[in-house]
Image (tube, grey):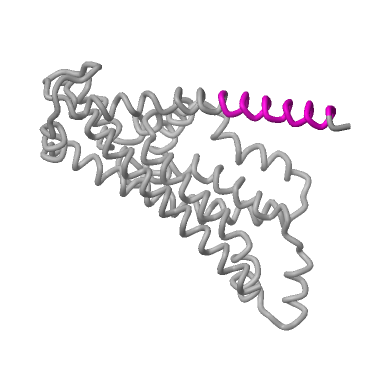
């Protein structure tokens, strides 16, 4: 019996070591390009090369002084914020409608909502390019917000729908039976339960919009930061691109840390209230 247990423990330890090794390899493979970009951003040379030579902050100063990059950052932030808001509202409404209403076309609508994720962004962008003039819209801020929200809405819908997986509709019926209005029931019962899905989906929509290239090629005039970086590297391949990338990585990490902490605190406070 002791021998069998020792063999079992040895097998478990070997399995954990193998899983840890695979995890470390995949993590290193994913992080390596980011680490290389960070290293190149501190080079003292005027061209992109690895390993970097010397150490200098000059490319961060050049990136912050580049008006094209600053304008692109502002435009990308505006588009991503607007797209995240539209996606949150539309995606939450779609998730609730698909959950509450039983109708013959429900499965088809679920597939339709997820279609923008499955289709290549180039196909979606080309279709929107032909659709926008029908509504009197030209390439710019508003068309970009609405176009990016097409993809963001799909993510919000599925994430909010996942929040409904363990949701008991009897709680809402009990609230209504006790005299609460539908708005009170939604605000006090439904919303706290699906809030993590809404927050997560909105964050996904923001990040996807901010980093979008394929769709932005069709619905903007090249004002977003990713497109500015593409234009810059085509004509001036200097390490300022790596400096901008490093700053974006740092901002993304801060955003994810704050987002995770805020979400955890909300979930903890919700459990305490219950």
Q: For the stretch drawn in magenta, what is the main secondary structure?
A: helix
- Tell me residue 168's x, y (percent): 76, 62
* Residue that protrudes farthest toward the bottom in the picture: 179
Q: Nearer the viewer, residue 257 or 55?
A: 55
- Tell me residue 195's x, y (percent): 56, 60
Horizontally, residue 149 falls left or right of residue 66, namely: right
- Tell me residue 21's x, y (percent): 56, 24
Query: Which residue lies at the image location 35% right of the left edge and 35% below the top edge?
Result: 219
Query: Which residue lies at the image location 28% right of the left edge and 35% below the top edge?
Result: 246
- Specify the quadrant of the image occupied by residue 76: top left
Query: Is 17 one of the magenta-colored residues?
Result: yes
Extent of the magenta region: 3-21
* Residue that protrudes farthest toward the right in the picture: 1
Horizontally, residue 64 falls left or right of residue 27, namely: left
Query: Is 142 one of the magenta-colored residues?
Result: no
Q: Nearer the viewer, residue 230 or 249?
A: 249
Horizontally, residue 11 falls left or right of residue 52, namely: right
- Specify the quadrant of the image occupied by residue 118: top right
Horizontally, residue 10 falls left or right of residue 57, namely: right
């Amino acid at each position: 019996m002791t021998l069998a247990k020792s063999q079992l423990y040895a097998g478990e330890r070997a399995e954990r070591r193998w899983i840890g090794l695979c995890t470390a390899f995949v993590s290193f493979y994913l992080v390596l390009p980011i680490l290389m970009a960070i290293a190149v951003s501190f080079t003292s040379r005027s061209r992109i090369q690895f390993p970097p030579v010397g150490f200098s902050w000059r490319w961060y100063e050049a990136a912050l002084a580049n008006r094209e990059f600053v304008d692109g950052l502002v435009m990308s932030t505006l588009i991503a914020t607007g797209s995240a808001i539209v996606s949150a509202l539309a995606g939450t409404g779609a998730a609730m409608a698909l959950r509450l209403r039983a109708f013959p076309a429900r499965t088809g609508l679920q597939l339709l909502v997820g279609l923008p994720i499955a289709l290549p962004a180039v196909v979606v962008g080309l279709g929107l390019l032909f659709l926008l003039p029908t509504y009197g819209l030209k390439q710019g801020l508003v068309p970009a917000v609405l176009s990016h929200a097409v993809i963001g809405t799909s993510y919000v819908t599925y994430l909010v729908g996942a929040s409904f997986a363990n949701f008991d509709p009897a709680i809402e019926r009990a609230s209504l039976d006790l005299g609460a209005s539908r708005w009170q029931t939604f605000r006090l019962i439904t919303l706290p339960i699906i809030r993590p899905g809404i927050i997560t989906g909105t964050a996904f929509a923001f990040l996807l919009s901010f980093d979008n290239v394929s769709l932005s090629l069709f619905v903007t005039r090249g004002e977003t930061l990713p497109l500015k970086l593409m234009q810059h590297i085509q004509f001036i391949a200097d390490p300022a691109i790596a400096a901008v990338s490093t700053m974006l990585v740092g901002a993304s990490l801060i955003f994810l840390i704050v987002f995770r902490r805020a979400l955890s605190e909300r979930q903890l406070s919700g459990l305490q209230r219950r």
